[in-house]
Image (cartoon, rainbow, N blue to C red):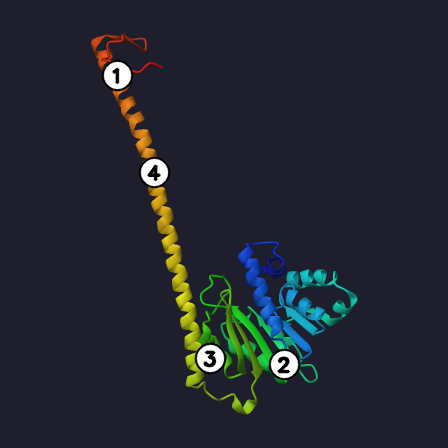
Amino acid sequence: MANRDQVNERYYGQINSEESHEATRNRIHWICRHVQGHTVLDVGCSQGITAILLAREGFEVTAIDLEEDSISYAKKELRQESTPVRGRVHFQLKDISQFERPPGGFDTIILGEILEHFAHPDTLLAHAYRLLNKKGTLVLSVPYGYHPFHDHKRTYYAGSLSRVLYPYFDEQALEVQHKYLCFAGRKKPKELREAKPGAEHLNKWMQLDEEQFRRVEQQHVRKMNQRKVALDKAVQRIRHMEEQLLPLERYARAEQIDKMQAERSGEYTAGESTGKNDGRISQR
């Protein structure tokens, strides 16, 4: 099943909510701000918005994706750009494992919402490490916590993501942007790849997770309170309606009883009362 990621439409606010539009823009802009050097490889580029934005700023961008529809869409978007921008972006239908390292490697590699689709993230990270130059930068984003998407094979928090990345990259930035973890790091020398994270790193990751969990709990409490207020209002409306309907029900019940009594006594014929109803049948 194709993922049908519509990131361009969300970026420009053409689909989904205003919140989704803002979150997408913030995340993409965060990625762009942390790109280093001049040459960029955008892996899983989807509809190409990040690559095009970077090309507008003068970066040379190679953008690859496995979905033919996404690459076709990206190329169509690129045709609307100026000649200099079009010359700086190259969209390709290709897997990163098939990609040959250019002379000198890339200055920056982008993995935007890609890692969570891998059951074995080291496979992808090893290729990114291979394709970067000696001091290259990895910029990455993943959903923070559980996202019920059919192709998400792993769930990431600050600690779990950082432990996966630690053997390959030195962390330079780690933030949460609208429920997405955003990471930027510098390629590690091979001789440092076996090092383990120290207490300082572990404490930092724990603090970030604690802060996010607290926010999630606060949001949950606010939603529960809002639901309670809405439920209380609904109960009040129902009671008010019952109070309005009760006299009508009593009237209808009394009229029915009078009708039955009149029929039994022979005083009610052809649907009309004889008037001997002790005044309880109202005039209409």
Say left or right for 77 vs 118.
right
User: Which residue is disc 1 drawn over?
Assistant: 280
Mark-to-mark CA distance, 4 and 3: 54 Å
Q: Position of residue 223 (x, y in %)?
A: 40, 55
In terms of secondary structure, where does tag 2 sit?
helix
Name which of mark 2 and mark 3 comes first in the sequence. 2
Mark-to-mark CA distance, 2 and 3: 21 Å
Tell me if I can see residue 185 in this picture: yes
Q: Nearer the viewer, mark 4 or mark 2?
A: 4
Of 39 and 249, nearer the camera is 249
Q: Quadrant of residue 31?
A: bottom right
Name which of mark 1 and mark 3 comes first in the sequence. 3
For the point 48% across and 75% down, the residue is 161
Q: In the rendering, which numbered label is found on residue 263? A: none
Q: Is residue 198 above or below residue 157?
A: below
Q: Position of residue 52 (x, y in %)?
A: 69, 67
Tell me if I can see residue 1 in this picture: no
Q: In the rendering, which numbered label is found on residue 163? A: 3
Q: Residues within 10 Å of mark 4 (few under 14, many from 20)?
A: few
Query: Contact, CB < 8 Å: mark 4 with mark 2?
Result: no
User: Which residue is disc 4 drawn over?
Assistant: 238
Q: Residues within 10 Å of mark 2 (few under 14, many from 20)?
A: many
The amino acid type, in three-letter code, at marker 1 is Arg
Q: Nearer the viewer, mark 1 or mark 3?
A: 1
User: Which residue is disc 2 drawn over?
Assistant: 131
Of 105 and 176, nearer the camera is 176
The amino acid type, in three-letter code, at marker 2 is Leu
For the point 26% across and 16% down, the residue is 280
In terms of secondary structure, where does tag 1 sit?
loop
